[in-house]
Amino acid sequence: MESTGLISFLLIGLIAGWLAGKLMKGQGFGLIGNMVVGVIGAFLGGFMFGVLGISAGGLIGSIITATIGAIALLFIVGLIKK
């Protein structure tokens, strides 16, 4: 992965983590924690979409994919914390 691709991936993950934190009220880890969750969620979302055979292209598609992955990760962590 080139450095510009890595930076883009991290920025998308940060945006996704912030969005997931806003959408999952009470399930977040604060701004920085949610951004880390977003980066990890970007991997998870890409994996989930790949398994399901869904393709989301472009910047908006990448943000949606990463946000869904981050929401899933926050949900799973919330279940484990209980």
Image (spheres, grey):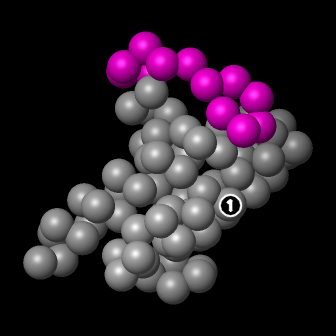
Q: Is residue 74 above or below residue 50?
A: below
Q: Residue furthest left?
A: 82
Q: Is residue 76 above or below residue 35?
A: above
Q: Is residue 52 magenta?
A: yes
Quadrant in which residue 76 is drawn? bottom left
Residue pointed to by mark 1 = 15
Which residue does the image show at 85% across and 45% down from the upper left? 3
Q: Residue furthest bottom?
A: 30
Q: Residue furthest top?
A: 53
Q: Is residue 77 visible?
A: yes
Please give left or right for residue 4 compared with residue 55 in the image. right
Residue 47, position as x, y percentages in the image: 43, 32
Numbered circles on residues, count: 1
Which residue does the image show at 50% across and 34% down from the upper left? 46
Q: Is residue 19 magenta?
A: no
Quadrant in which residue 81 is drawn? bottom left
Query: Callout 1: 10 Å neighbours few (<14), some, many (20+)?
Result: some
Which residue is more in the foreground, 41 or 2? 41
Residue 80, position as x, y percentages in the image: 16, 69
Which residue is more in the foreground, 6 or 56? 56
Amino acid type, residue under disc 1 in the picture: Ile
Q: Give the quadrant of the N terminus.
A: top right
Quadrant in which residue 25 is drawn? bottom left
Which residues are drawn in magenta? 50-61
